[in-house]
Image: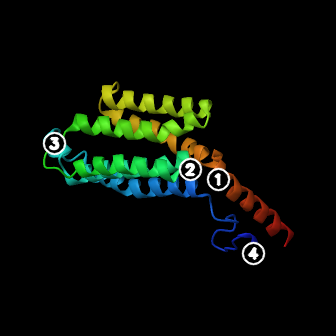
Amino acid sequence: YEKFGCIRSTMFPSLHALPPLPVLAATAGFILHTPFSFMYHWKYAHRLPPGLARIEHWSRRLDHVFMHVICTCMSYATSGSWNYFLACAMLNADCIYRQFLPEVRPRRNLIRIGLSVIAYTMPILWWGNIILFVKISVILLISAWLFASYPIGGWSHSAFHVAIAMLPPLLMIAACNLSSSRAQIQTAAMCAVLQEKM
């Protein structure tokens, strides 16, 4: 059983083999970003006055830093290419560096986050998964509209987070659809069958 790369775990009985690397990259991105986003929004965003005090606060800077971390992880999750990952990592490393400069420039931050998101979504289109790309693009456009125009006042930012929460399952689908993920998914399926026979 183990010689095929299968895993036996009483804690995770449905985990028959390690997930593919692109899926692990997507998972790592979500796990790394979430605590910093949660900390900023739950503890500081509503307490800090609008303007520079909020924009330059360390918690918001860390939220932005980890947005770029998740974008870097997603670049591998959607491409399965280490070269593409490294190119996106360089872009995001520069974006992260700029979060630690004395002056925060919100417009520059938004443009750079937008470029980083475009960078991790483009491989989905390159792999020919047009329907998935359109679904992701619609969610991103609705989210961007809610974030930029505030159509429902103070609730718009909450609505933005509700909309963007629809993105992770689609990114996991993109990661699973990669040819580099197929072998590990087949191994997991084989291990599940072997487990049933034992």
- Badge 1 amino acid: Ser
Gap in Å between the C-alphas at discs 4 and 2?
A: 25 Å
Q: N-terminal of the two: label 4 or label 2? A: 4
Secondary structure beneath disc 1? Answer: helix
Gap in Å between the C-alphas at discs 3 and 4?
A: 59 Å
**Residue 188's x, y, as percent?**
72, 61
Question: Are dots 1 and 2 in contact, CB under 8 Å?
Answer: yes
Q: Residues within 10 Å of mark 4 (few under 14, many from 20)?
A: few
Q: Is residue 6 above or below residue 24?
A: below
Q: N-terminal of the two: label 4 or label 1? A: 4
- Badge 3 amino acid: Pro
**Residue 31's x, y, as percent?**
45, 57
Secondary structure beneath disc 2? Answer: loop
Q: Quadrant of the C terminus?
A: bottom right
Q: Name which residue lies at 56% across and 53% down.
A: 22
**Residue 148's x, y, as percent?**
31, 29
Q: Which residue is mark 2?
A: 80
Give the label, 3 or 4, closer to the camera.
4
Gap in Å between the C-alphas at discs 1 and 3?
A: 46 Å
Give the total of numbered labels.
4
Q: Residues within 10 Å of mark 2 (few under 14, many from 20)?
A: many
Q: Which residue is mark 3?
A: 49
